[in-house]
Image: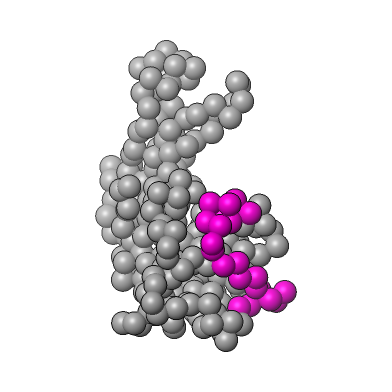
Amino acid sequence: MAYLNKTLNREDNIVIVADTTNRYSERNLKKMFPNAIVLRPEKTGYLLPELVDSLLVDSLPNKVILESQNFSLISSASSQLSAQVSKDREVQLFTTLRSNAYQNKNISRKQLGLLKFTYTTGSLPLKQGEYNTFQKKYITRFGKPPGREAIKGYDLTMDVLLRTAYCGSMENTKDIGETQYEENRFLYVNETPDNYINGGYFILQHSGYDIREIKK
């Protein structure tokens, strides 16, 4: 939300697409961008092509914020929006929550690249064939590269151990601030007096078939 608030030009053609489970995000985005157009999907999780075409313009950059964890809607939106990209029509896609639905092999990486898809995540994408010391030891022991969960577990354990060794306790961990390892970033903040959440995130953007970090 902070990135969108800082980056998006209020004069651009901003379109918010949100399903019924994301009305809270829709309301917050509408407050942030009062001139934005709200596009509601069909009950089947589908966007009407003629409606999409009518809401996108050639005279301004089109910035579409998609708030959904529904595969059908994500697939429909990415397919139709990417088809609108041309030398005369700029379309970029954003989301505040990239769910596991985006991992589906039927979501075209080429289409996301055309849309310069931009999102927030707690982990960098896995680099196939590039392994650090932990990953090499994991392959030696188990015969295959570690998955995202194993890598995050390792990074989290290392981070907690190093913070505790340096600060003496997690209560003083704010003195260290944000840390980053091979694939994960950590910034512990108090959600309640006795509870910490991780506020360390990456903002990533698809560029062609690659994914790069946006440092803003």
Number of marks present in the image shown: 0
Quadrant position of residue 61: bottom left
Q: How is the image coloured?
A: one colour
Asked if residue 103 can be seen in this view, the reply is no
Q: Is 21 situated above or below 176?
A: below
> Which residue is pictured at 45% across the width and 46% down the height?
2
Q: From the viewer's perspective, is residue 146 above or below residue 10?
A: above
Find residue 71 and report its horizontal and vertical position in percent.
Answer: 59, 69
Tell me the quarter of the picture where residue 59 sits.
bottom left
Q: Residue furthest bottom?
A: 50
Task: Look at the image and give the residue range highlighted in magenta.
Answer: 27-47
Residue 132 within the magenta-colored segment of the rendering = no
Q: Position of residue 190 (x, y in %)?
A: 54, 26
Q: Position of residue 89 (x, y in %)?
A: 38, 79
Front-lying residue, 82 or 55: 55
Determine the residue positioned at 38% across, 19% down: 175
Is the residue 14 above or below the residue 89 in the image? above
Indicate whether residue 43 is drawn in magenta: yes
Q: Position of residue 206 (x, y in %)?
A: 36, 64
